[in-house]
Amino acid sequence: MTPLASLVVVFSPMFLAGLGWLGAKAWELLKKKVKNETLKSVLLRLDSVVLTVVKGLQQTVVEDLKKASADGKLSSEERRRLKQQALEEVHRALGSRGVKELRDLLDLWEHDVDKLIGTKVEATVFDLKKEVARPEPVSVDHQQAATSDPPVVSR
C-alpha cells in the first residue's frame, strides 16, 4: 500500500465523521430558520387579525356605546364585554388551526394564548387611541423655505 493510500484509509473515517457533523449542523440551522419564519408569519397574522377586529369593533360597537353613555365613556363592564367579544372574534378569524399553531410555536397553554390575544387587543386599543390623540404633522412649504423668507407652516 502506498503512503497516499494509507493516509486515505486513516483519514477517511474522520473526514466522513466531520462531513456528517457539518450536515447535522446545517440541518439544525435550517430547522431553526424555518421555525423562526413560521413564528414570524403567525405573529404577523395575529397582529393583523387583532388590528382588524379592534378597528371593526370600534366602528360598529364602541362609537354607539360611547354616544349612548351620559359621559361619553365606556363603563368597565362594557370594556370587559368588548374585550371578550374581541377575543372571540380573533379566535374565530384565526381558526382552530391558527390558535393551535400559535400555542405550539410559543409552547403555551390554551389560557395563555387567550392572555396573549387579550394583551394584543389592549395594546392595539392603546395604539389606536394614541393615533387619534396625536396632532396632525406640520408640513413646511419647501419652495418657500428655499427663499430667504421665513417658511410658511400649514396644518
Image (cartoon, rainbow, N blue to C red):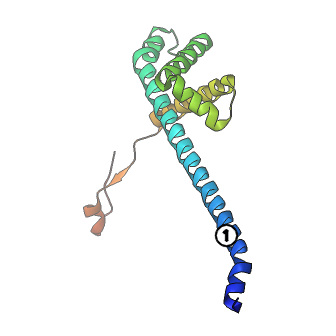
Q: Position of residue 25 (x, y in %)?
A: 65, 60
- Which residue lies at the image location 57% right of the left edge and 16% below the top edge? 84
Quadrant of the rendered image containing residue 19: bottom right
Q: Which of the two residues, 44 or 34, is positioned nearer the viewer here?
A: 34
- Which residue lies at the image location 61% right of the left edge and 60% below the top edge? 26
Q: Position of residue 28 (x, y in %)?
A: 64, 55
Could you tell whether 82 is left or right of 146 in the image?
A: right
In the image, residue 83 sits, relative to residue 148, either above or below, namely above
Could you tell whether 2 is left or right of 120 in the image?
A: right
Total marks drawn?
1
Q: Position of residue 120 (x, y in %)?
A: 58, 31
Q: Which of the two residues, 37 or 46, is positioned nearer the viewer here?
A: 37
The quadrant of the picture occupied by the C terminus is top left
According to the picture, the residue beneath numbered tag 1 turns out to be 16
The quadrant of the picture occupied by the N terminus is bottom right
In the image, residue 151 sits, relative to residue 74, either above or below, namely below
Q: What amino acid does circle 1 point to?
A: Leu
Q: Secondary structure at mark 1?
A: helix
Q: Which of the two residues, 83 or 44, is positioned nearer the viewer here?
A: 44
Q: Position of residue 67 (x, y in %)?
A: 44, 12
